[in-house]
Amino acid sequence: MAEGRAYLDHASSSPLRPAAYEAMLPWIGHPGDPGRVHAEGRAARVALEEARENVAAFFGARPREVIFTSGGTESINAAIAGAAARDPNWRSSPRDERGEERQLEEGGRAEVHIVTSAVEHSAVLEAANRAGRVTMAGVDALGRYDPDTVLAGVQSRTALVSVQLANHEVGTIQPAAEVVAAARERGVLTHVDACAAAGYLPIDFAALGADLCSVTAHKFGGPSGIGALLVRRGLRIPPFHLGGAQERNRRAGLENVAAAVGFAAAVAELASDRLQAEAEAARALTDRLLTEAPKLVDGLAVFGDPVDRLPHLVCFGVEGVEAEPVLLGLDQHGVAVHSGSSCSSETFEPSPVLSAMGVDADHSLRISVGWSSTPDDVDAFLAALPDVVGRLRSLR
């Protein structure tokens, strides 16, 4: 990052922690394939499995329950496609070119059904729509789904219930554990998207009780290009990637040893009480934003739950000003923030999450802090925002 800038977009991607960087260095360019029996391969295998053990321990899972992936998006796609493929009546192309459901031919197989919520990440919603028919539960004005509403969508043909642990855009913490417990009582597989929460909330896969859980490393200071799909012991789902026996036949392709080692180093830094300490520091910074920003700018609304939320993330609505010029104006002041979801940087269309909440979906700012954030970063944002918004409003 450029010196003197305030980086407040950790919910998109956080700077690499020095400990992760140092741990990765010996493995960048290392030739060893963990699947080979020569010395280089054996060394890579040891490093990979030690990383798996550390990642598993941090997320309350067994090492054999951890499948390393290229990131959260792949992890989500693998979970949903795998759950759909387990269903005996699954079809890979349930919709025609117009997006309409096809009528079953005589003797054909019924399409799979997936239940999710209207505020899930686009990776969940798009993967679910590709897999089959989707029922989306609505949310309240804070962006929180109700477990009863989610479970009301479960049908006899439901193959998966997929819900988030916390919202990636407004930070609202979700009642995922309640949904998981009730869905499993009905015999339905469950998937929890914990990518936004990983590294900021304690996650215990065993206690959560989900069949599948997606996490990623780069949002809390691990390297990009690495994530994990946690798969409950005893559950078998078809691999998303084919062409090799890596990851115990669960994900084909040469393992990214350097990234896995960096992932493990990042979670090791958060072990013990460090996660709580960083979360408390992050909440102190975002509490300042919630308290002070509305005093400085008229027409600033808080989106999401201001209390029961991810500690590092807040989302504001800015009345009467489009998001893009605000982002550009803040950037000119040396402040990096974002608008909308973490994967919408190429477009500035209305936020589906905010639309589902019934709030202004066109004028949002998401500010997110992380391990490297300081009070000076928040000061820079609070100093720049009134000037940027004031100049833009004067042009109307």
Image: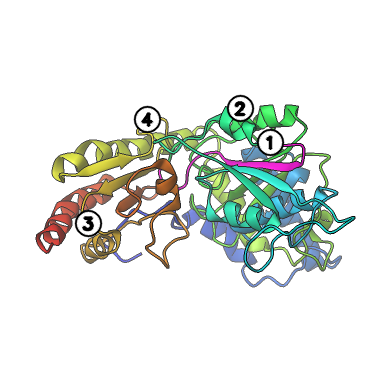
Front position in the image: 103 or 290: 103
For label 1, the residue is: 154
For label 4, the residue is: 307
In the current view of this chain or complex, which residue is farthest to the right?
107
Q: Secondary structure at mark 1?
A: loop
- Mark 4: which amino acid? Val
For label 3, the residue is: 321
- Mark 3: which amino acid? Val
Front position in the image: 184 or 277: 184
- Mark 1: which amino acid? Val
x then y, percent, for residue 202 = 54, 34
- How crowded pointer 1 is (Cα within 10 Å; few <14, some 14-19, many 20+) is rated as many
Distance between the alpha carbons at the discs numbered 2 and 1: 14 Å
Distance between the alpha carbons at the discs numbered 1 and 4: 30 Å
Q: Colour scheme of this structure image? A: rainbow
Quadrant in which the C terminus is drawn: bottom left
Which of the labelled discs sits on residue 344, or is there none?
none
- Sequence-first tag of 4 and 3: 4
- How crowded pointer 4 is (Cα within 10 Å; few <14, some 14-19, many 20+) is rated as few
Magenta stretch: residue 164 in it?
yes
Tag 2 and tag 1, C-beta contact below 8 Å: no
Q: Quadrant of residue 31?
A: bottom right
x then y, percent, for residue 392 = 15, 61
Left or right, 277 with reference to 81: left
x then y, percent, for residue 302 = 30, 40
For label 2, the residue is: 178
Q: Secondary structure at mark 3?
A: loop
Distance between the alpha carbons at the discs numbered 4 and 3: 26 Å
Tell me the magenta residue range.
154-170
